[in-house]
Every structure is written in C-alpha cells, then in structure tokens.
Amino acid sequence: MGKLTSWFKRRPTNLSDSEQGGTNESLPPAYLAQTRQLLSKMKILPSKMRVNRATGARPLYRRIWFWAGLGVGGGIVALIYGISLIDRTLPDQSELNAVFREQTLTIKAADGTILQQQGEATREQLQLEQIPDNLKKAFIASEDRRFRQHNGVDPQGIVRAGLNNLRSQGVVEGGSTITQQLTRILFLKQEQTIWRKLKEVRLAQKMEQELTKDQILERYLNLVYLGSGAYGVADAAWVYFSKSPDQLSLAEMATIAGLAPAPSLYAPDKNPEAAKRRRDLVLLRMQEDKVITPEQRQAAVQEPLTLKSSLPKRVQVESPYFTSYIQKELPKYVSPNVLKSGGLVVETTLNPSWQKVAEEAVAKTLRNQGRWENFKQAAMVAIDPRNGEIKAMVGGKDFGKNQFNRVTQAQRQPGSTFKGFVYATAIATGKSPYDSYEDAPFVVDGYEPKNYSENFRGSMNIRDALTRSVNIVAVKVLIDVGFIPTIKLAHDMGIKSELKPTYSLALGSNEVNLLELTSAYGSFATQGLHAEPHGITRILNRQGKVIWSANFKSKRALDADSAAIMTWMLRNVVEAGTGGAAQLDNRAVAGKTGTSDEARDLWFIGYIPQMVTGVWLGNDDNRPTYGSSSSAAYTWHEFMEKAVEGMPVEKFPKRPKLDGRKGTIKAQSIKPKQILNRSIASKDDDSEGESARNSNSEESGSSRRRRSRRRYSQEEQQSSDYTPRRRRRDRSESSSSNSSSESSTPRRRSRRVESDSPPPRRSRRESSPANSSGSSGSSSPQPSWRDRLRPSNQ
C-alpha cells in the first residue's frame, strides 16, 4: 500500500497528459483496474482520473465483445431453460415405448383374438416383418425420405419441403419426420401452435434415443390414421380393399401410403382422382429412391383404382355381454387415473370356441322351445371351477336391443337349485344320504310347503329326496341343520346375494344371479374349494407392461368328503332324476334342476370336474312360462356336448365311506313355535279328471307342437327302476313349488298338468306302463301327449 501511495504522489492529478503521450511509469491495464477499484472503495480516487485509452482499458459495458458474449450466453441460458421447461411437460422416458394411443381400450380373448376396441384403436397390431417391404418403403418415400439418416428432426427435409411447396404454390410436402408424426399420434394434440411443434421436436429427439428405427417404423405403421375409421396399415388394407397387407398390389400399397398427409383429401372412396394423383406421386418418389424400377412404376400407374370397401373391424364387437361385463369389472383392478389415461389392453379368460357354441345353444333353445313354452330370454355361463375363469357368457337374446346382462345383473329365484346348499350343509353336519324323512303334509309356524303335484311319498331318504326334488323333505332338513349354517355355507361357496332366514329359503325363494349360483356349484366340482369367478387375467398399459394380473386363491368352503358325497348325490339327479336331459354319452355329469313358482324361472346348473355351466330361461317381466327345467337341462347338454370335444375325461372322486363319518359343520337346529303334521290324502281322482279335461282341449294342436312335445316328459319318477334313456329330449325335470313366499298359494292351472312321476324310460317301440301316480290310465304303446308335456316346478 505504501508503494502504491508514493506512486500516486508522483503522478499528475490530471491523467490527460499521460493519456496523450504515454509514460514509462504507466501500470498494466489489469493492475490499473484493480487499483482503481481499491481506491474507489477507499474514496481516494481523483475525481478527474480517466482510463488510458491507449491500453484499451475501457469499461466492460462499453466493449462490443461484452455485449456479444452477454447475448450469446443469455441465449444459451434461455435455450437451456426453454428445453427444461418443455421437458417438464413431456411424458416420462419410460412412456416413450407406448404402442397404443391414449383413450383406447382393447379387450382380448384367451387366445389373443380381439373381442372389442374402443377409441382410436388399431384392430391388428402387426410385427414389422409381417408388413410387406414395398409398403414400408412406400411410406418412407412419401413421408420421410431420410428416415434412416436423421435423429428425429430432419433440417434438410424441412428446407426441401419448403422449396417444393413454394414451387407448387401450395402444400405438397410436409417437413415432419415419421418420428415426429409418431410422437404427435401418441402424446400430443393436433392443434397448430409453436409450443406444440417445439414439444414435438423435443419428443422426437428423445424417442430416437430410446427406440430403434425399426421400432419407430413399426409403431407408426400400426397407429397412423388413414381415413374411413382405419388406424394402421392392416385396417386400411381391409377398409379399402378387403385384403390383408400381404395381399396388396404395389399400386394399392402406394394408394394407402399416400393417405397419410391428408386422409380426407386423398381417400380413394371419396376423391378417386386425387387418390390416383397422390398414388402416382408416391410411385415416382419410390422410383427416384431406387426402391422400384421404372417398369414397375409404369405398371402400377396403369393399374385401375379398384376398391372393395369394408367396415373397420374395430367397430365389430364379439361377445358383447361378456365385454360389457369386463368393462364394469375394470375399476376393481385399476385406478381411475389409469382408466382415464387409456391405452389399456385387457386380456380375458373367454374361450372363443366355447362362446360360439354357447351362443348357438341359447339361440336354438329360444328359437324352438322358447316360442311355444312362452319364454323370451335365456342366459348361460361356463366357468372353470379350478381357477374361477369364465369361459363363456351369454347374457340374453339380443345385445343390440337390450344390454341387460341376465348372467350378472338379473336377480331371480333359484328354485330347487338352492336345495344343493341345504343338503350340503346337512351332509357336512354328519348326516348320511340315507337318513330318512317323512314326505307328508306339513305346516311349520304357519308356513306350509307343498310338493308341486301335491302328492306325497311317505318315508324317503335324503338322496332320493334330492333326486326327485321333494320340497317338504328339503324344508325339514333345513329345520334340522339351521338357517345360519346353511346361509354361511352358501356364502362361502360363492353366493353373494343376501339370504334371509326363512323356511322358504330351502325352496329357493331368495333371489340370486346366474353367475354366483353357477360359481357356487363349482365348489362341489373341486371337492369343496371355491375360486372367485373372474373374466380378466391381465391388464397391460400403453407400454405393454403388465399393471395387474389375476391371482385368485382357492379357499376351502366345504370339506372334501362332504363335497364328494354331494357330487355322488347330484350325479343321481342327472342319471336317475329330474336332470336326465343333461346326460353326456362318455362322461359323468352332476347337477340340479330348478323351477320357481309358476315356472317363471327355469334352471339347470351342472358340472364335470373341469367345467361348471349354468343355464336360466324365463322372461324379463317375470311372466309365467309353460316350460320346465328340462328345457334348461337340454340347453346345457347342447352346449356341453360340443364344448367337451377333445377334453380329457376326468372322473369324479369316489364316494367316501359313510360309517363313522364326523361332521365338519355344527348344526344349529331351528326350534319352531308350532309344527302341524297331517295325514296323507290321495288326490288321484282330481289329477285324473284334470288330465282328461286338458287332454280333450289340446289334442287338436298343430303338427309342429306334436313334434316338439316329444322333448319333454313328466317331472319325477316314482319307481326306482331307472334305465338309460335313448332319447335325450325325453329326459325329465323335477317338480317344486311355492318357493317364492312363506304361505303357499295354488299354482295357476296352465295348459299342461304337472306330475310327480314320469314313466320309465323306453324306446320308441316299447310300450309304456301306466303312470303310477294315476294321472294317466292309458295303456297305449306310448304315453299320452300330456305325459310328455308336463312341466316341472322345483
């Protein structure tokens, strides 16, 4: 500091002289600047001191390079900030692998076939090697000739497009690369703004870093919109030419490639002349790029533009009742935000072959039996009981007219099918199938259950009571085991609907839906294990990553021995009782029929070890039918006979020993306030008179009705001498009634009379013995038409 001060003392106070002539004592500019800064802080700098211009030590703000550097630096900072700002609005890097558009939903069957698509979806996602080479090169020649060279943005292409557009005085070529177009398809809106363009450029650069050129090209060719509802080249080939891409000619490929810039302008079905001009331009570019020869181009140009239009496949919906069920199930497995973002692929359990057979079986029943048995609707569902996967679902007659799904949404009285849970509870408490009950008039706390025919059999065991669907015995068994154990077991096996503790519970008065009832019977098929019924196996996001997969674990609902005994009893229902129409030639079947009051609901739930299938027939407005659950059993047979083709034959478990068996459920017997047992009174005379009256009024029916009547027989068989039936359509159905209310009311007399006892099985030429119930005294070789027409009510 002393040296610096002495120097200043020797310097003139006015530096102008030094500035003009210079001096040997002048300091270096950098040193002078530091000195001035220090003196300024010390407040001792002379007021008239000025910088020596000869040294170039001017203030920074007066230097050109300072402002130039400041401008460049500011620009760089602004660019970095702008890029970071754009990047914050772009999708995550992981999302750049997206293969589906936003707001789309694709539902697939178990074999990968597409059942339904919603939104801007691509029906067929092709691998790049599945797309013809000339079709790929046509798009590159038309849309991005330097596709293999640029890194997402092509400055040369932008300049070239601008010059071509100026020469043509119109927009004939775009500057966007295929990568930019793909980013626009997957992530951006279509608004024409600078901000959108900047995001598009940045996204294209990022996508080029994340994906290979082939991956980008494959996604683009599968997603690009090509007019008339076609998304992707496979859709376009179908929509315009009704062909697959590998069947297209060179001219047709060029036509499709020419659609990309403006599908509405170049659509061949709307503007054929414009489409031809565009096609020829694409062919010219392909020749210029040496993709095709001049001869190939000339031949393609001379080819006439021949269209064969078809509707986009994506608008077609297969198995609509099932797909609508799937859409309602989705919110259970994914969040609302995921659903809103879209682009999901849902893989389901549906077997398309079985679904087709199920639809055919239901349609056949409605077309034939439905017309003269007075039911307008039907439903069917098939489930693999081992894992709960739904393999087929038919929710009604015509989804186009009525979207109400009678498998999942219709709550109906199950009739005698509910007896399966009552008897299963009894077996699980330790009862034997051979325990006997009295089938006789019975009133408990004012509730009087009745068998449909109002006939009584006296003492009979549990197995026979289930086989013949005897109502009075079912109520007595319910009283012995209790409401609580029965309801709990039904819920554990798969019934989700509310079940009320009333005596009519035994006869199926509490409403359930077909899906839960069928699933619950599946627990018998799996030796007491219940798997939650479901239709979705996996859900994939836009990037093809699995975001949910099914992992339903089976739970023990009923002990294995009780389930095996129930299967043995339910097999007897099919082999020797009311479910005879469901028999299959080469494998054992177990199941149960059911009919609600006035035949409003006709049911059959049957199973083999690998599949359980439920059928319901009836009317949406709950009108009575003239049918019986034999029709439901026959519909079941029509489906299963074809569905099991090629399926290995598996045997049911053997019936376990009954001696010394202990129960796994504790009975909680009901203690009625009042029980009234009445003596058995014969009603044969009344039944015979009614049969005669109806016979006189019906024998003049049409030949069509006479042919149809052979399909049905009387309900329950009095005799135990059963032999295999030779005609499936003659198999019989069980009777049950008054399950819909606590107080029994007489059934409305319909055109046909219900009977407890069908005649023994016979061939066409065998004579038929007289009906043991007395409802028919005929000794003719064949039973009367009344015997064959009698419906049942469980």
Image: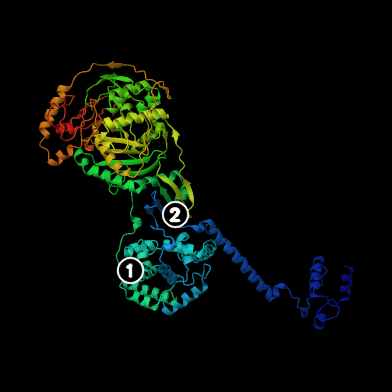
The image quadrant of residue 35 is: bottom right
| Residue 336 appears in the picture as rendered | yes
The numbered mark, 2 or 1, whose residue comes first in the sequence reads: 1
- The part of the image, by quadrant, that contains residue 67 is bottom right
Q: Which quadrant of the view contains residue 7?
A: bottom right
x then y, percent, for residue 763: 18, 34
- The quadrant of the image that shows the C terminus is top left
Determine the residue positioned at 14% across, 38% down. Answer: 706
- Residue projecting furthest to the bottom: 21
Residue 227 shows up from this direction: no
Judging from the image, the colouring scheme is: rainbow
Q: Is residue 313 above or below residue 174?
A: above
Task: Give the amino acid at mark 2.
Answer: Gly
Disc marking residue 784: none
Question: Within 10 Å of the Cα at label 1, are there few (<14), some (14-19), or many (20+) other Cα atoms?
Answer: many
From the image, tell me which residue sits under label 1. 268
Q: Please name the residue shown 60% across and 64% down the image.
A: 80
- Look at mark 2 in the image and give the residue it sits on: 343
Along the line of sight, which residue is nearer the eye, 708 or 601? Answer: 708
Residue 175 horizontal side relative to residue 461, left or right? right
Q: From the viewer's perspective, is 188 left or right of 630?
A: right
Per the image, label 1 sits on a secondary structure element best described as loop
- The image shows residue 88 at horizontal and vertical percentages of 55, 58
Whole-percent x and y of residue 729?
22, 37
Asked if disc 2 and disc 1 are in contact, CB closer than 8 Å, the reply is no
Which amino acid is tagged 1?
Pro
Where residue 98 appears, as percent x and y from the top left, is: 48, 57
Q: Quadrant of the N terminus?
A: bottom right
